[in-house]
Image (spheres, coloured by chain):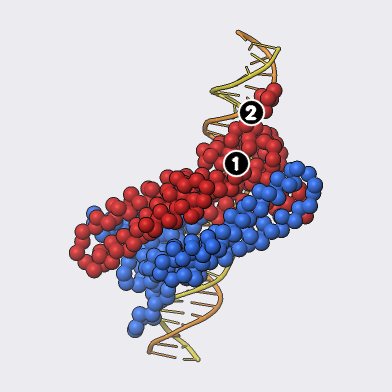
Chain colours: A red, B blue, C yellow, D orange
Amino acid sequence: MKLAEAKKQFVQTWARLGAEWGINRTMAQVHALLLATEKPLSTDEVMEELSISRGNANMNLRELMNWNLVYRELVPGERKEYFRAEKDIWEVAKRISRERKRREIEPLLRELSQMETVTDDSTEAKQFVKTVKDIHEFAGKIDKSVETMLKADENWFFGAILKLLR
Amino acid sequence: MKLAEAKKQFVQTWARLGAEWGINRTMAQVHALLLATEKPLSTDEVMEELSISRGNANMNLRELMNWNLVYRELVPGERKEYFRAEKDIWEVAKRISRERKRREIEPLLRELSQMETVTDDSTEAKQFVKTVKDIHEFAGKIDKSVETMLKADENWFFGAILKLLR
DNA sequence: TTATATTTTCAAAAATTATTGAAAATATAA
DNA sequence: TTATATTTTCAATAATTTTTGAAAATATAA
């Protein structure tokens, strides 16, 4: 397989995966393109490669920077901004986990707590509270393991789990 | 908090979470409603509770059955179909993991293998292949741990990790 | 068998989400 | 300072996804 072809395939695969996990297709494409490219790219190069507008490229590059998946890189003597993706895949996993924990898991935990305050005396209510508590406990475990993984350095996968289980 | 209110909140929370993870909002609502309700519900009851059309209710109930998250339940003497959600949250996690593994991770692994066959001799190509291999290795670890978790019973979280690390 | 209840399908409509592109804002150079 | 390059914004448009609802299909009862 030729590099150019493989890159295209990679961009497409990453975009599909992103879409399946609730990430904007174009954002995933931009991320993939930067992951697949060694040198930093300018907005114009991203536009060109993916055939997207300036506004779209700009917006998705900003969003990737919000997720800490892409850096701004200054090229000496150039006025334009250049962008480069974090290539260390464990680092990428950590950053995505950190954001999803903050944006999704933590609010979920708070909301589930609220729902556990149902005081109705019916069987229906008791069953409901049990289900919510089960989900809460489960989400709490996920949250804790992500937390530990984010603290651990090298072999987080090992560290996180040991901590989780003690 | 009153049961009725908490249920509404639960449906909304679950729908938001679903949307964030690439699951159709209504499908998540239907799932939440069934999770929150002890007795099985008919299509008409789901339509009524969520103010959705028959076609929409039918489609999402079928899809939830495809994911093995919802069962068809026969009520004696009734001609209608009734539906009930799997309430065991570990079981729910396993079934979702199983489907996502099959539909998303496994195809990903195959596609990444393809991209590693790039033979170009440039630094650019070597860097690309390295990135792809790193992602492949990472995805492989996820895949293995899901696999082990699906085999393990009770404390899969422990079993999966031990197996992964040896 | 025929009548009735229930489920499924799917083309059209609605709602949502993503994208464009040009104007405005900002930054840098002269 | 003014001129020019670059980035950002955002209303309008386009694309995509979801939903509707009524007709067709299917299942059950009489």
Residue C14 in the image, given as x and y percentages of width and height: 48, 53
Amino acid bearing label 1: Glu
Q: Are marks 1 and 2 on the same chain?
A: yes
Quickly name the residue at label 2.
A74
Q: Position of residue B98 (x, y in %)?
A: 52, 66
Q: Amino acid at mark 2?
A: Leu
Separation of residues labelled 1 and 2 (CA atoms): 15 Å
Single out the residue that lies furthest toward the left. A121
Q: Quadrant of residue A84?
A: top right
Q: Quadrant of the C terminus of chain A?
A: bottom left
Q: Which residue is at 56% across, 59% downward?
A: B141
Q: Which residue is mark 1?
A: A86
Badge 2 marks a residue whose secondary structure is strand
Q: Dividing the picture into quarters, in which one does residue B39 lie?
A: bottom left
* Image position, residue A155 (x, y; %): 52, 51
Instruction: Using residue B63 as the reference point, say whether residue A51 is left or right of it.
Output: right
| Quadrant the N terminus of chain A occupies | bottom right
Is residue A78 in view from this perspective? yes
Identify the disc placed on residue A65: none
Give whichever of A10, C13 is nearer the camera.
Answer: A10
Q: Is residue A116 left or right of residue A158?
A: left
The disc numbered 1 marks a residue on which chain? A
Question: Which chain contains the residue that carries disc 2?
Answer: A
